[in-house]
Amino acid sequence: MNFFLIITFFSIILITSFIFLLLSLRKNNLHHNQGSDLISNSDETSSPQDVGSFYNTYTDDFLKVYGNVIQAYRTVNTDDLLKYESDSMGLTKGLRLLDAGCGVGGPAMYFAKKFDLHIDGITISSEQVKIANENIQSGDLTDHVSIQHGDYHKLEDIVDLNSYDVVYFLESLGHSNDHSLALGSAFKVLKPGGKLYVKDLFQKIPAIESHKSLIDEEVKKINDAYHYNIMKLESILTSLRQIGFIISFVKTIDIPLDKFENLTISNDFQELTGIGKIDNWDSYIFPVDFFEILCIKPEYDIEKGNKRYFLQNLYQMQVNNWKKSQL
């Protein structure tokens, strides 16, 4: 009898140990897969320095084709685009904004002038800093807009923590070689209750299985040509939640067709530079969709907060308390 109990006891220990081993392996595998999803083609993505060099070389060409608003998804009159983006962000007078990947400052100048705002812009390109500051000077906006050279993956080393009402990325997050790091940095410099706005390209989910390889191929071409790292929407949303953001909305950009700038402007840039040239438009499958995302940094203190997103705020407080208990 005692022998049977001993055998049973050791059998339970062995089975339990085996189960824990399987769970541990599964957890590590999931963690690995999540990490690889968050950053596509991580071995091939460009560094911030590569992106800076690209824009130092080609900013003049971008300006010839795109003007001061260097965004691929655009309206014929860029004021319509910037009004749309400002409406999505809910901009009002007196807010403090950070433009992460600001280019030559076109959007920042528009928002500052229209809403009487103060905007700090960060770009990795020294050439863009020079042009932006010339534009700000000539536009008499030096009291409202400030542009400096820097890496938006390290915003907390450049600007004050918890100091901005809105941080936005307008087709600039895609240049990141670590999307999660860039978004986490934005979280640190936002005020509690502040907003993050992202408008960018995301890899298209194919409706037909045979299109998957074609889309993957075209995405790689864009990434290589423009030093980009086109994101997968689901992975970015996962990353935002893990960082601690409350997702307010995710939606397709809704610009009426009669205001939309067709792709001839991209053709013009490709013809001018030879970059990303598409040889056969008849068989070309457009590999991306454009989405906008608005997120909120939780207030944590429900009583002092704006009483929006109550359950999400409550959950973030619970997560925060759990993290503290693990220290």
Image (tube, grey):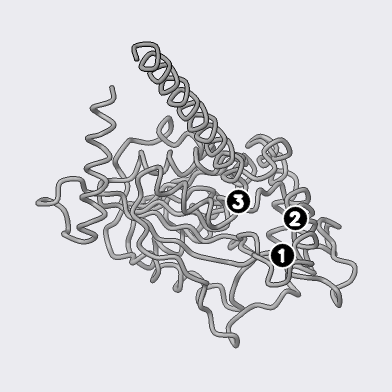
Pair 3/1: label in front: 1
The answer to which of marks 3 and 1 sits earlier in the sequence is 3
Gap in angstroms between the C-alphas marked 3 and 1: 14 Å
Q: Is the residue marked by circle 2 packed among few (<14), some (14-19), or many (20+) residues within 10 Å?
A: some
Residue 64 location, x and y as percent? 72, 63
Most foreground residue, 235 or 151: 235
The answer to which of marks 2 and 1 sits earlier in the sequence is 2
Pair 2/1: label in front: 1
Residue 290 location, x and y as percent? 58, 67
Q: Quadrant of residue 129?
A: top right
Residue 218 location, x and y as percent? 78, 59
Q: Is the residue marked by circle 3 packed among few (<14), some (14-19), or many (20+) residues within 10 Å?
A: many
Residue to which mark 1 is pinned: 287
Q: Quadrant of residue 319?
A: top left
Quick one: SS at disc 3?
helix
Marks 2 and 3 close (CB-CB < 8 Å)? no
Residue to which mark 2 is pinned: 222
Residue at horizontal 25%, vertical 47%? 192
Amino acid type, callout 2: Ile
Quick one: SS at disc 2?
helix
Residue to which mark 3 is pinned: 174
